[in-house]
Image (spheres, rainbow, N blue to C red):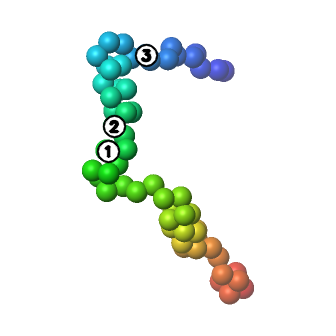
Amino acid sequence: MATSIQPTPTLLGKEAEAFWEKIANYDNYLKEKGIVLNRKKIEEEAARFRELFKRKDDDDK
């Protein structure tokens, strides 16, 4: 049995203006929080994280 589809919420008036202001200042927000989006660094950290869950051949024997 399928669930009913809910209407998509929309922003109007001041809420919409506040949203677009957040989008426009997103780069500044990231700088304030010290967040750096560096693809190479993210991929390196993801590889290290995957290593935590890799099984070694010795463990399976």
- Residue 57 position, x and y percent, is 70, 83
* Helix, strand or loop at mark 3: loop
Count of marks, rendered view: 3
Q: In the structure shown, which secondary structural element does the residue marked by tag 1 occupy?
A: helix
- Point out which mark residue 25 bears: 2
- Precedes in sequence: disc 1 or disc 3: 3
Provide the secondary structure element on which disc 2 rests.
loop
Instruction: Name the residue nearer the viewer: 9 or 34.
Output: 34
Residue position for label 1: 28
For marks 2 and 3 on the same chain, the one whose residue lies earlier in the sequence = 3
Q: Name the residue under label 3.
A: 10
Position of 39 relative to 44 (above/below): above
Question: Label 1 sits on what residue type?
Answer: Asn
Label 2 with label 1: CB-CB less than 8 Å: yes
Q: What residue type is labelled 3?
A: Thr
Position of residue 45 relative to residue 58, above or below, is above
Quadrant of residue 13 within the rendered picture: top left
Q: In which quarter of the image is the C terminus?
A: bottom right
- Disc on res. 13: none
Q: Which residue is drawn at 31% across and 44% down?
A: 29
Q: Distance between the residues labelled 2 and 3?
A: 21 Å
Mark 1 and mark 3: Cα distance apart in space: 25 Å
Q: Nearer the viewer, mark 2 or mark 3?
A: 2
CA gap, disc 2 and disc 1: 5 Å
Task: Look at the picture and state if 1 lies above or below 51.
Answer: above
Question: Where the N terminus falls, by quadrant?
Answer: top right
Q: Is residue 46 visible?
A: no
Task: Evaluate if marks 1 and 3 touch, with contact meaning CB atoms under 8 Å apart.
Answer: no
Marks 2/3 in contact by CB < 8 Å: the verdict is: no
